[in-house]
Image: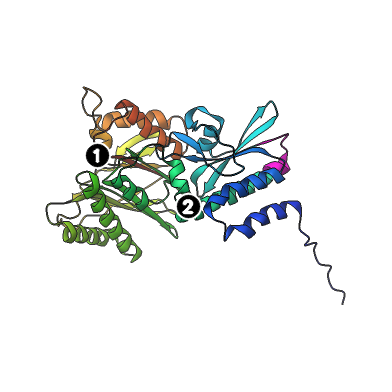
Amino acid sequence: MTAEPRADRSESFGEALLGTVLDRAHELPPHLVGPLVADMMERLGGRRPQILLQDYGQLLLVPLPGEGLTDGDPQVIDDSAAGRCFLGALPVELPEGDGVRVHLPLLDGGDQVGVMAVTLDRVDDDDRRMLRRLSALVADLLVTKHGYSDLFFRTRRREPMSVAAEIQWALLPPLAMIMPRVALAGVLEPAYDVAGDSFDYALNGDVLHLAMIDAMGHGLGAATMATVAIGAYRYARRLSTGLTEIYAFMDDAVAKQFGADHFVTAQMMRLDTTTGHLQWVNAGHPAPILVRDHRVTRRLVGPTTLPVGLGGAEPEVCALGLERGDRVLCFTDGLIEEHAAGAEQFGEEQLIDWVNGLERTGRGVRAVARALSHTLKRARGGQTTDDATLLLVEWRG
């Protein structure tokens, strides 16, 4: 019997390029991620490589320092080719005098890490394929290495951050998740001084679990209370308990740690991503808003119980069947109770008007959440007296 000829397993140029990254990734120190990328771009014939990271305020893309990487001023997300790449999560090619400047999104699970940019003499489909795969590897490297170093945190930080905000940012999951059946995006303001607001989520099999909280007070006390509340939520969620049991765990943890005069408003949800069946419990939190066909159709008002920490009655579980493309906006009271200078509170009606205007643009959840938060920030003159957090969830079906 004649043996089948073995397939050619010799290393091609593309495999050698990607293989170099994979072979070195395991023991690569964080500060050498940039130089490795610069080396890969040079082997591709590229010039002026850059890695641009989103700042905490989600306004700028900031160049990562590193040997071989091009420095420069931060680029405004709303007014640059790199920003268009970032917001659309798609490559952007810009003809220049000495070639083509290519911008590629650095995506990890839908979370937008930043943008990679390089200039080539010309760009063909082979270049695009190679750059797309390299950018995916670079995104994974940035995500896995950031826990070992302060380099990426320092790059993203454009102004001093409070200790309370430091705690809250360390507590957060990625700000966005884009999956085939479900997508979500969240924004926290003020980015450098947030204290009591937080959110958390997990996609376990076909079920998306999420929570949004608002701890009373400001500063370190609120951040500490939020940490306990989110920790209790994760503990109960990972036991595969129901929403009412999760509330009981959180209520008990906050009460035991802080006493009867402290509390955290909370909202916990479960979404079956195969059917669109949404369940939630509300513990003194503002009611979420349902967006259908790019327009706010209703507030998800239902029975509430006391905020966690106050020993409220067992919450009633509310339910709703979502339709494909529906979005649910969760937010803290700082989003609607803030005042513009010399004016009344924003209120839910004004929030709904802004949501309707942004939804008509047909943009994805990341772009809409970011635009909504920045619209509110501009309306209050860039200042805020309370945390203002939002989380936008889309059931894609």
Q: Residue at (72%, 55%) from the top-left corner?
A: 16
Camera-nearest residue between 158 and 181: 158
Measure the alpha-carbon separation of dots 1 and 2. 32 Å
Residue 202: image quadrant is: bottom left
In this rendering, position of residue 34 left or right of residue 242: right
Q: Residue at x 46, y 56 (%)?
A: 148
Q: Quadrant of the N terminus?
A: bottom right
Please say if 347 is above or below 7.
Answer: above
Residue 348 spot, x, y in % from top left: 26, 33
Residue 219 forms part of the magenta stretch: no
**Type of residue at label 2?**
His
Question: Of tags 1 and 2, which is closer to the observer?
Answer: 2
Task: Tell me if residue 281 comes above or below residue 299 in the rendering.
Answer: below
Name the outermost residue toward the top: 342
Here the colouring is rainbow
Q: Tell me if 168 is positioned left or right of 260 in this view.
A: right
Percent across and percent down for residue 228 are 26, 57
Label 1: few (<14), some (14–19) or many (≥20) C-alpha neighbours in 10 Å: many
Residue 249 pos. (x, y %): 24, 62
Residue at the far front in the pictured view: 67
Q: Which residue lies furthest to the left in this view?
A: 261
Q: Which of 134 and 32 is in front in this view?
A: 32
Q: For the residue marked with disc 1, what is the amino acid?
A: Asp
Q: What element carries label 1?
A: loop
Q: Does residue 134 show up?
A: yes
Q: How crowded is mark 2: few (under 14 residues within 10 Å), some or many (20 or more)?
A: some
Q: What stretch is highlighted in magenta?
A: 119-128
The one of 65 and 111 positioned closer to us in this rendering: 65
Residue 349's label in the rendered image is none
**Label number found at residue 333:** 1
Pointer 2: what residue?
A: 146
